[in-house]
Amino acid sequence: MGGQDVFELNVQEVTKMTRTWKIAGINFDHMHMGDLLRMVSEHPNAEIVSVSDEQPDRMRGVMHALGIPSSRGFGDYRQCLEETEPDIVILCPATAHHGKWVERVAPFGVHVFVEKPFAGSLPEADRMIAAMKATGKQMVINWPLRWYPSHVTAKRLVDEGQIGEVIEVHYYDGNRGPLRHIMDKIEVPESDPAVKNQAWWYQKDAGGGSMQDYLGYGVTLGTWFLNGKAPIEVTSTVDAPKGLEVDEHSITVCRYETGLSKYETRWGAFTDPWKMQPQPKCGFVLVGTCGTISSYDYENTVLMQTREDERGIVVQVDQLEFPNRNPIEYFLDRLDKDLPAEGPLSPAIARIGQQIVDTARASASQKRTLPLIP
């Protein structure tokens, strides 16, 4: 299929949408809000009707970058929702405040898009599910790794049965640290320890730490690769950096009926994977009953071993096409078709991930293996 054919196909897909979706971005704790609003601004059937943050200064850079007029910026989320009446709210609060913010906006009858991770705890995640169930609207949890072509390709190969049943997931991911970049992954200088402790990322009560930031990615996508399987028990350990109250490095081992899987998170990787893969590489290695797949973040190929070719087959990653190139396209398409979100974005799969994260956190604290929290 040539480029012109792809363009025409995409235009046809766009025209299938029956409405323009009005979207508001509320709470700018997480720098991903700017990236998500950029996706909204580039979607032909979406409009940014408002943005809101209790600290308006935090919105100004994004508003300027995306040309959002000052009249659409609000310091009070209630005024934002009442005056602009969005269909969808994007939430990017600190991890431990996800439940509070979903409960605040759900009564306004909006669909809710929550940037990862799911929540600060499993009870909080269940509060979010209950708040949305009462409205009949959809809630999705976005995991940016879900949209990397390498991991999409790996999932396709798994679903095709190319490596048999997945029995092990090996995951390593992270970056140089959450204070080393802002919107669009623009680099900023390294912060000194005093600045770190002022940021919510490094505050325990706010849900900070590399485990809270990155383990949800690994175990939620891991659950996706494992077709919904949950582990029996979890063992986890974290580092204890001097002068910090949260971890910057965690290792979690999950025991499934099929065996062991390992999930490792790291703030302080040697390089950021979107610029240059560190060692260990960031991404996944999947082991199946009759093959393996290595799928690394941002790479253009995956490597698949099979019984027929144990030396490995280099597979070019799939080209993602509208409406499955990013989470905004995907969510609007599902809403337009009146279909629930699937995979890592679905609360059902993300809840299993949250079970693992909560159990891992308890395991690290108690320094022992624990059964999966129900």
Image: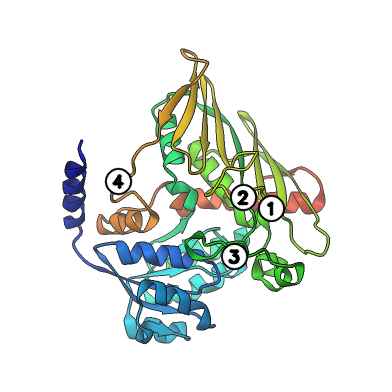
Q: Is residue 295 above or below residue 6?
A: above
Left or right placement of residue 364 versus residue 136 in this view: right
Residue 233 placement (x, y as % from top left): 69, 40
Please tell me which residue is depicted at 50% across the width and 68% down the height of the picture: 92
Q: Amino acid at mark 2?
A: Gly
Label annotation for residue 321: 4
Tags 2 and 4 in contact by the CB under 8 Å rule? no
Please tell me which residue is depicted at 47% across the width and 78% down the height of the picture: 59
Sooner in the amino-acid sequence: mark 4 or mark 1: 1
Disc 2 marks which residue?
174
Label annotation for residue 188: 3
Residue 70 placement (x, y as % from top left): 38, 85
Under tag 2, what secondary structure? Answer: strand
Label annotation for residue 268: 1
Task: Let me know if residue 374 appears in the view.
Answer: no
Tags 3 and 2 in contact by the CB under 8 Å rule? no
Q: CA distance from mark 4 to mark 1?
A: 33 Å
Residue 302 placement (x, y as % from top left): 47, 32
Q: CA distance from mark 3 to mark 2?
A: 17 Å
Under tag 3, what secondary structure? Answer: loop
Q: Amino acid at mark 3?
A: Val
Under tag 1, what secondary structure? Answer: loop
For the residues carrying marks 2 and 1, which lies nearer the camera in this image?
1
Q: Is residue 13 above or below residue 76?
A: above
